Amino acid sequence: MPKSQTNIAVLVSGGGTNLQALIDAEKRGELGNGKITLVIASKQGVYALERAKSNNIEAIVLARKDYESIADYSKALVEAMQNANIDLVVLAGFLTIIDEQVYNAFPNRILNVHPALIPSFCGKGYYGLRVHEAALEKGVKVSGATVHIVTPECDAGPIVLQKAVEVKQGDTPEVLQKRIMEQAEWKILPEAVKLFCDGKLKVENNRVTIKGE
């Protein structure tokens, strides 16, 4: 019997636009039985914390600089999420390195959204505007976003959903970033979360199949 509620933690490092997309989707009833019950920020003062506060979501700051090592930081993250009975972890612009303790505690239960069509423009060093700068430098005609399950290897986990977005002549990295957010990220991230909460994602041999499709 499925749980009556899937508790979601959203991990953030900045403004929290993807967090807002998830909050809006939840308000529209588009996350299935998913409920955002915790927001964890990797630094003080980020706007994502304001978004959590104004929507009555518990929010805590776990700052990387307060911990001696990645291992200590990862341990604190795991403990905070386990204490909050978290079922699903969503990385929404979370730019802090974590180790295998987190992956082991939440196997196949961590989702990340990446602003490109993996395996293009992904991996170490590809985050934020750098992704879009690289795409424009290459002259691609199509970019987009990918939601994938997080594994220890950066951006290499099983792909859940992808959505393509047209690259237009004269695009700047900022313009392309905004279009990909609006047309892809903010749509497929809530959709992937709902699929997880509905128990429709099956992971086998580093591939995701969606039940009923």
Image (tube, grey):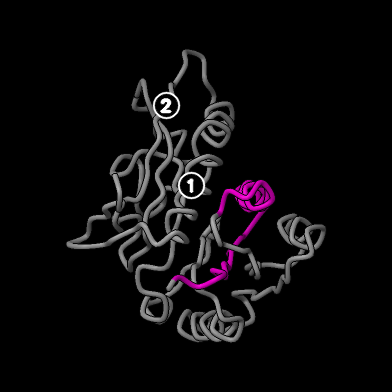
Lateral position of residue 90 relative to residue 146, left or right: right
Q: Position of residue 94 (x, y in %)?
A: 54, 60
x then y, percent, for residue 44? 73, 67
Task: Answer whether residue 5 is magenta in the image.
Answer: yes
Element assignment for label 1: helix
Would you say residue 175 sits in the magenta stretch? no
Give the image location of residue 16, x and y in percent.
Answer: 66, 52
Left or right of 92 on screen, residue 208:
left
Badge 1: residue crowd in 10 Å (few <14, some 14–19, many ≥20): many
Secondary structure beneath label 2: helix
Q: Looking at numbered disc 1 in the image, what kind of residue is underneath it?
A: Glu
Q: Quadrant of residue 200?
A: bottom left
- The disc placed on residue 22 is none
Outermost front residue:
1
Residue 88: percent from left, percent from top: 49, 68
Q: Nearer the viewer, residue 172 or 11?
A: 11
Q: Which residue is mark 2?
A: 136
Tell me the distance, in whole angstroms, between the alpha carbons under discs 1 and 2: 27 Å
Name which of mark 1 and mark 2 comes first in the sequence.
2
Residue at 42%, 34% in the rendered image: 144
Q: Quadrant of residue 131?
A: top left
In the image, residue 124 above or below residue 36: above
Q: In the image, which is nearer the foreground, mark 1 or mark 2?
A: 1
Image marks 1 and 2: residues in contact by CB distance under 8 Å:
no
Magenta-highlighted residues: 2-31
On the image, numbered disc 1 is attached to which residue? Answer: 191
The residue drawn where x is 72% and y is 70% is: 59
Q: Is residue 202 left or right of residue 68?
A: left
* Residue 99 vs residue 106, the one in the foreground: 106
Q: Residues within 10 Å of mark 2 (few under 14, many from 20)?
A: many
Q: With respect to residue 54, does 169 lie above or below?
A: above
